[in-house]
Image (tube, grey):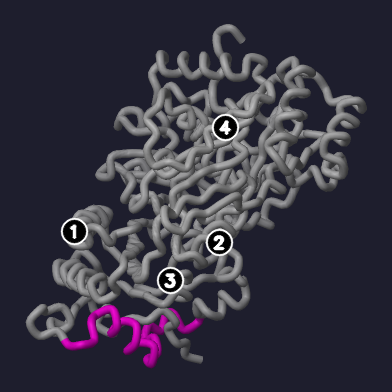
Amino acid sequence: MPIFCLVPRHPVWRHGVFPRWLVSSHHRTSVGLIRALEQKTMKRKCKDQSRTSRPTFLQVARIAGFLGRRDLCISSARSQEVMLTSDRYAVKRLPFSHVSNEDLAFFENIIPGRVVTDPAELKPANVDWLKMVRGCSKVLVRPRTSEEISQILRYCYERNLAINPQGGNTGMVGGSVPVFDEIILSTALMNQVISFNSVSGILVCQAGCILENLNRYVEERDFIMPLDLGAKGSCHIGGNVATNAGGLRFLRYGSLRGTVLGLEVVLADGTVLDCLTSLRKDNTGYDLKQLFIGSEGTLGIITAISILCPRKPKAVNLAFLGCSSFDQVLETFRTCKGMLGEILSAYEFMDDKCMKLVEHHLKLSNPVTENPFYVLIETSGSNAAHDEEKLNHFLGQVMNSGLVTDGTVATDNKKVKMLWALRERITEALSHDGYVYKYDISLPVEKLYDLVIETRARLGKTAKNVVGYGHLGDGNLHLNVTAESYSHALLEAIEPFVYEWTAQQHGSISAEHGLGFKKKHFISYSKPQEAILLMQQFKAMLDPKGILNPYKTLPPSVSC
């Protein structure tokens, strides 16, 4: 039975040609290119017979329900028991105290009914969502306020009990789960909005608020959150700030280091540091909040955030394009920046192997003809007609110049989400493909895909798949290698090769995921020894006993 194309496409895109009347400023009809792409092809069937056996986006959406659930999914392919981190990586436990019955009684007195010791309830909190690392904590505490956290940390500091802060547990580098038996301190119940200023767009909230819930809250007030992640349905804003998460809106709104205005943080000894300012400008002394942004819970536990939210765009367009080479991806980006300017909000790329994995494991459908590379471009602005005109000219330029071979455009919110799913769910598709070795690299954009090519050649058939995708607009590559199961020999073939290659290009071994447990020993590939020593001194000053998220982010200091 023939299948209708859900995502609208203009017939000429199939042949790689734009009709002049659609892009000419002198003879353009009242229906622009975007409208033509949306309206005309909704009534026509896909003629590509290779697609007739594939389900449509809508069919897949109904089956998987992904339109209503944007959080990360755990692969059923690796539901077997995860090896203990301490066994796999041969790490030794530091001399922290063990939790006693007296300790449990103290916690129960502070937060009655919110101390978890049931092994079944603890199991998911001990394992990262990628099913790669596992701790063996025997207790989880769920405070609701910064004062409760202060009392817990003050007690743990005196008792020398290690603490593992945990938000949504969506991290990629093993930073959100215990390595041994550290007490898990969950911020899940700290989920209240404290205030929102509808004039300035400044939101103040607790650290345990889920990102998607916050975005929904501010959208109702005609604003949006300045960051967007594939894990938005699960991740906590406190964890986002603690890891300095980047995500899909970085190109437009920048880093959390710029949008976070203030923080409330509880230090290792229980001191509550109130820097929860809502001022755009505050040049009094050192900007202490920057110490905790990206510190991954090793310097203090973030309990509340003040963040600047931009206005909600009135017009959003999404173009999904096919390119025949990475050079064309780069040239399309250069053209895109020049022609779209201030309305460009995202520029993402993925290779054909990513698309095949999404199609195979998630049963999503490729809306364009097969290409070696795909580009997803989002525009957002305040004037729909203005944005459409700029996008029309851009699409005409890249098609006529041969930079793009095929594509489709969406402006309807549901269709926009469907196209975004192709990019956002790559991580999920990879988790279905086997054990995943994940690398989050910053590189000069012209070198971005070279690392994928060289890694693929180096590993050969020892790897199942080597794929590359990411935020090209930010120079951020997500390099992923899959295998049927964990192999130490394969790991040694990848590391430190990937880090050495990155260092040679003056890149960063962690663009947005942080260092966590997995990457801490490789920090010297991106930072000089003087900087590492200074970081260790900050850690020793703020957490002299090292109880906050131990074994993470920094290598042991010489004194250890």
Residue 120 rendering spot, x and y as whole percentages: 84, 47
Q: Are the two marked residues, 1 and 2, in contact with CB atoms closer than 8 angstroms?
A: no
Q: Which residue is mark 1?
A: 335
Residue 356 rendering spot, x and y as whole percentages: 46, 63
State the CA–CA distance, disc 1 to disc 4.
45 Å
State the CA–CA distance, disc 2 to disc 3.
20 Å
* Label 1 vs 2, first from the N-terminus: 2
Instruction: Write the residue at 42% across / 24% down.
Output: 286
Instruction: Write the residue at 47% across / 71% down.
Output: 418
Which residues make up the magenta segment? Answer: 29-54
In front: label 1 or label 4: 4
Q: On residue 274, which mark appears?
A: 4
* Label 4 vs 2, first from the N-terminus: 2
Which image quadrant: the C terminus?
top right
**Amino acid type of the residue tagged 2 in the rendering:** Tyr
State the CA–CA distance, disc 1 to disc 2.
35 Å
**Amino acid type of the residue tagged 3 in the rendering:** Val
